[in-house]
Image (cartoon, rainbow, N blue to C red):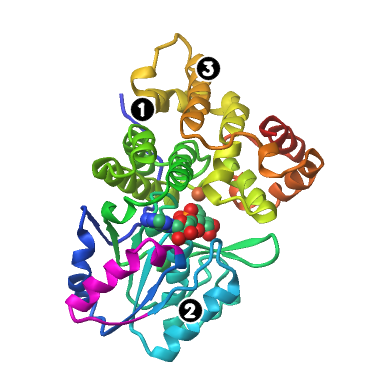
């Protein structure tokens, strides 16, 4: 018997360093990339957590010339990207470090591209529109969540409620540094929400309709193995370094998986929650996750059943049918979100029932994501899912 393997193309980050304390490698990496002056891109929360100081100590000790842009805000709008870009040009830097959550990393990716290629943001929105080249780019995540350090994507807020993406292999960094010491102080609710975001990346990659492939499956399973067994410990006992490192690596592997087998309806229904109600990305995903999974059961129970023992660990009980195993997985995901003490209903998030049709109409605009869903989602389905989550 021969096993069949789908054809695929797989792009990823060139180099990854996975170890507590690995920001100590930053000088060596910068020199290998031939950088003389760096722009460090981060946000005020990273300064308040004392993390920027730690990175600056490393840069100073290693005699590296650098300047800082620390005005990143969550879900960065175009003006913030442009301000960081203006500083990169004014200072004449020849290398970029993104340091923080997905918002800082995504901005760093765009600045590295636009500062060198001379393209404008409007030129590069969409898939494979960037021509490059870009400046050398190093990304240091401080949340175990978006996996931005492993994806060819950067997301920008373009209007009151809308986001646009730049998708290009040029946005994959030269180096990702995964140092869990930087995540020890991440508050429990952000650890939980960003961790669920990363688990969703792996689950949606594993069930992705068109580009699921051998590599993305391996990565998604290993990512879930690491994160499902560590997310509760990392959230409830934030100083557990081993649990934190496992989450950081899991989020990176999940990023590699969904960069090549894209996410689907969970993200499509999560985006309008962020856009209209400013709910953080991870929490938006968590609020709709069990309900989208329940909707998807008829189309992908076999895939969910394959993931069930990995995610459920000791709580997994074999059943005779994959339908039964898959619905137990959905119930387990609901219990997991409860154990993480995340809100579970849209009505607890200042959302009114009459807002749901507008959210459903907006979710339909995420066609780029919906086409990857294992089951077709129409506007009435989206409304039913939001009602179930209400
Ligand atoms: N590029 C991609 O592939 C991709 C994928 C999904 C989401 N995104 C984007 O990423 C962004 C969300 O990123 P996020 O969820 O990481 O949140 P974030 O970057 O917005 O950061 C959330 C908050 O956590 C704080 N924080 C981060 N690390 C900390 C630490 N170690 N200790 C204390 N506080 C810390 C930050 O200061 C910030 O206030 C959104 O813009 C989303 O659109 C990108
Ligand atoms: Fe996400």
According to the picture, the residue beneath numbered tag 1 turns out to be 310
The boundaries of the magenta stretch are 45-67
Q: Please, which residue is most extreme toward the top here?
A: 320
Task: Say which element carries label 3.
Answer: helix
Q: Is residue 188 magenta?
A: no
Binning the other alpha carbons within 10 Å of mark 2 as few (below 14), some (14 to 19) or many (20 upward) gives many
Choose the circle earlier in sequence order: 3 or 2: 2
Task: Say which element carries label 1.
Answer: helix
Which of discs 3 and 1 lies nearer the camera? The answer is 1
**What residue lies at 19% left-to-right and 74% top-to-bottom?**
32
Compute the Cα span from label 2 to label 1: 41 Å
Compute the Cα span from label 3 to label 1: 17 Å
Which of discs 3 and 2 lies nearer the camera? The answer is 2
**Image-quadrant location for residue 141:** bottom left
**In the figure, 20 relative to 356: above or below?**
below
Q: Percent position (x, y) of residue 252?
A: 35, 50
Mark seen at residue 323: 3
According to the picture, the residue beneath numbered tag 2 turns out to be 84
**What residue lies at 32% left-to-right and 60% top-to-bottom?**
13
């Amino acid at each position: 018997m021969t096993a069949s393997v789908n054809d695929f193309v797989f792009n990823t980050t060139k180099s990854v360093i996975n170890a507590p304390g690995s920001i100590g490698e930053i000088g060596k990496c910068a020199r290998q990339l031939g950088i003389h002056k760096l722009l460090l891109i981060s946000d005020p929360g990273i300064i308040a957590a004392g993390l920027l100081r730690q990175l600056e100590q490393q840069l100073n000790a290693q005699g590296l010339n650098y300047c800082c842009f620390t005005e990143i805000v969550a879900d960065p709008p175009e003006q913030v990207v442009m301000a960081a870009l203006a500083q990169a040009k004014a200072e004449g830097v020849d290398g970029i470090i993104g340091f923080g959550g997905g918002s800082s990393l995504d901005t760093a990716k765009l600045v590295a591209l636009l500062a060198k290629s001379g393209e404008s943001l409007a030129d590069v929105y969409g898939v494979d529109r960037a021509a490059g080249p870009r400046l050398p780019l190093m990304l240091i995540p401080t949340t175990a969540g978006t996996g931005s350090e492993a994806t060819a994507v950067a997301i920008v807020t373009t209007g009151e409620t809308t986001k646009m993406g730049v998708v290009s292999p040029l946005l994959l960094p030269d180096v990702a540094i995964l140092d869990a010491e930087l995540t020890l102080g991440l508050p429990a609710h952000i650890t939980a929400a960003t961790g669920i975001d990363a688990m969703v990346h792996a689950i949606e990659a594993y069930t992705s309709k068109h580009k699921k492939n051998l590599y993305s499956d391996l990565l998604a399973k290993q990512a879930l193995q690491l994160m499902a067994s560590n997310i509760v410990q990392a959230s409830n006992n934030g100083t557990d370094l081993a649990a934190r490192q496992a989450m950081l690596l899991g989020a990176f592997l999940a990023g590699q998986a969904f960069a090549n087998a894209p996410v689907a309806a969970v993200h499509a229904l999560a985006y309008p929650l962020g856009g209209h109600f400013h709910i953080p990305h991870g929490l938006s995903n968590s609020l709709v996750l069990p309900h989208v999974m329940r909707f998807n059961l008829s189309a992908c129970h076999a895939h969910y059943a394959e993931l069930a023992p990995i995610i459920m660990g000791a709580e997994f009980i074999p059943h005779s049918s994959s339908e039964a195993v898959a619905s137990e997985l959905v119930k387990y995901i609901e219990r997991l979100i409860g154990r993480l003490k995340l809100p579970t209903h849209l009505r607890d998030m200042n959302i009114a029932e009459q807002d749901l049709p507008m959210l459903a109409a907006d979710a339909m605009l995420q066609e780029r994501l919906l086409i990857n869903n294992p089951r077709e989602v129409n506007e009435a389905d989206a409304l039913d899912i939001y009602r179930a989550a209400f």
